Every structure is written in C-alpha cells, then in structure tokens.
Amino acid sequence: MSKFEFVLEKDSIGFSDTSWENIIKEGQRIQYEYWKKAEKAWSKRFKMSEGWQGSAMSPVIKIICEEPEYIFKGTVRLPGRFCLSSKSRWSSILRFYTFGRKVLKDDTGYGYKWDAPVCIYVEGKTYNKMPDGGTMIMKPFEQTIEEVIICPMRKGIPIYLSENQDRLSVRNCKILSHGGAQVGIRHGPKLAKDKYLWEDVTQSKEGDYNVWLTDPRFVDLQMEGPHNNKRPQAAMAMSGANIIIQNLNLYGWMQGPYLYGGINRLINGLTQHWGNTSDGRMYCSRDEVVSYTVSYTDDTKDTDVFVGIAGNFKTWYLRKGSRAPEKGGWNPNEPIL
C-alpha cells in the first residue's frame, strides 16, 4: 500500500459513508502539505489562477475497494486529484440507496431538470478550510473512477460531473441503472450551490453555468440502462472539448451519449444491444433506439469523429437548436441542446 492509498471500510451496520468521508478528510490533509509548498514555490515563478500550482502538485489519493459489496446511505463526493478504484476489474459493487442526510439532488434544470438523487458527485473547484486555519483551493484535476460497479438502488444518477473537470477518467467500469435515473453519467452546474452539505467545504465562486469538460476520457464502460421507454433519457449527457468515448457497451438504453456544446468530440467504438430483457419484456421498438446524438454549431461542424458504431441504429449529428428528424432516443419534441 502506498501512503496515498486508503482501503474503504464498513461501519458496524454495514454502511461505508463514514469511511469514505474519513478518507476524503485525511487525503485532503495530506494533499494540503504538498499544496502549500507548491503554491509558495511555483507562484514566485509563474502567476496562474488561484490554486492551480498547488492542485497540480498534490498527490493523487486513491480510495481502494476490497469488499465485494459496499452500501451507501447518501451521496459521496470525489474531490480534485482523487481516484476511486478496486483491486481487480469489477470486484466491488457500490450500492447507493440515497436516503441519508447527505443526498444531493439534480434540481438545476440545466438541459433538463431530472430531480434525481446523486450517487457519486465529482466536484468542481472547492475552497477547503484546513485545521491550521488556511484554505486549500483544489481544482477539479485528474479525477478517476475505475474498475468498480456502480448501482443506484432508488432512482439515483450514478455519476454527476460538476462544472469543469480537467482530464477526468472513467474507465473499465460497469454502471447499472435498472434502479437508477434516466441518465447514467450527467454533466451540469454545481449542486446545492447556496448550502453545500459538507462542512468546511465551499464550492467554486464562478457563475452557475461554468459547465465545460476538458480532455475527459470514458473508456471500456458497460452501461446498463433503465430498460424502459420513458423520455428524456441518455446514457451520458455532457459538453466540452476533446471528449473521448471509447469501447462503450450499451444495454437497455434508448439513447446513447448525448453530446452538446462541444468541439473535437470522438466516439471510437460503440455497441448497443436491443431486444428482450431477461424476464422477456420488450422495452421499446427497434426504431426508437439512437446510438448517439451530437449537436454542432457553424463553428464546430465537422470537428467531431464517430467510428466503429455497431448495431445499425440511428446516429444523429444535428445542428444545435434543430429538431430530431423522427421519433427516437432522447426526446423528439424538444429542440436539440
């Protein structure tokens, strides 16, 4: 074990919320010592935005899952330079019941108002009050979710990306949404902006719609959807530059990735299954399935690439503000985001 790695534990009744929060607290205490030194040394050489040098030179804190199953009452947060991982591929399933005291709700109305609880909240920039009275400004740099199974149990959003992650990586995960919301990975503004649920943490002071991913990677994911024909729905909903989606397996989703407000987006390998569920239900007709919906503007048209799309379903590359050409996917009754 590295000094920057911590094993996730369970409490006496089987929940892991407290262990997660303790790891975050101790991990950020460790990061703070590196952060202070880097801010002092590098700020003398290069003037950059607040917290940039310290965040870049802080260690990555890894939360390691070893148990086959973890259960959470509420939302868990993943700060900048933190990694969630397991010892081997899909060896741990994280179940989120979202009935606890600390539950964030996606009620922003950005793109669509889901009103769904959040399982893993990937933080944007934060201001963290530290024990010595100082403040650590942590950027949303290089957060990682890998090798785990994420399972909402009560209509939760598996992963919520807040604001503007830089070089995010979500890889080699299984994301189960049979009991989840109508969106798998959701990107939007910060939640609970006026009253954040974690003491000693303040979210970014930028405007409400500082929503733009830079160089994120979503690689080797299996995403199993709600298996229904309710709209709107999307396996992913996000915007940004240089988004890479590679080797995505979709089951039970009418709509694959929905990418809007971006440039240089790449989908390199996507396969989508349509057919009866394990109990014999048919959740939609074949002509309702859309592998991806990507919007463009005059400035971004033809900067995006889509290759290796299997299944022979609809693929929509549409002008922003236009309407879907026919029924299918997200929602044909509203303009494309």
Image: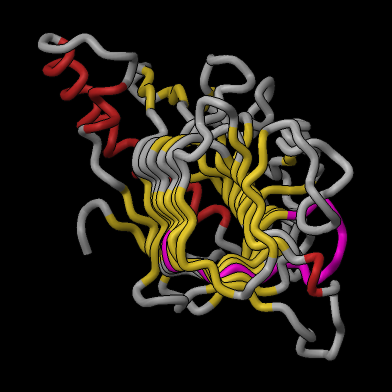
What quarter of the picture does the C terminus occupy? Answer: top right
What quarter of the picture does the N terminus occupy? Answer: bottom left
- State the predominant SS element of the stretch in magenta: loop
The percent position of residue 143, horizontal first and vertical second, equals: 39, 45
150 relative to 17, above or below: below
Q: Name the image quarter holding residue 196.
A: top right
The percent position of residue 253, horizontal first and vertical second, equals: 71, 66
Task: State the residue at coordinates (85%, 56%).
Answer: 327
304 relative to 199, above or below: below
Q: Name the image quarter holding residue 323.
A: top right
Check if residue 224 falls in the magenta segment: yes
Task: State the residue at coordinates (80%, 36%).
Answer: 335
Q: The magenta stretch spans which residues?
A: 219-233
Q: Nearer the viewer, residue 279 or 288?
A: 288
The answer to whether one can see residue 70 in this image is no
Task: State the residue at coordinates (66%, 36%).
Answer: 319
Task: State the residue at coordinates (79%, 74%).
Answer: 286
Q: Name the image quarter holding residue 251.
A: bottom right
Check if residue 332 falls in the magenta segment: no
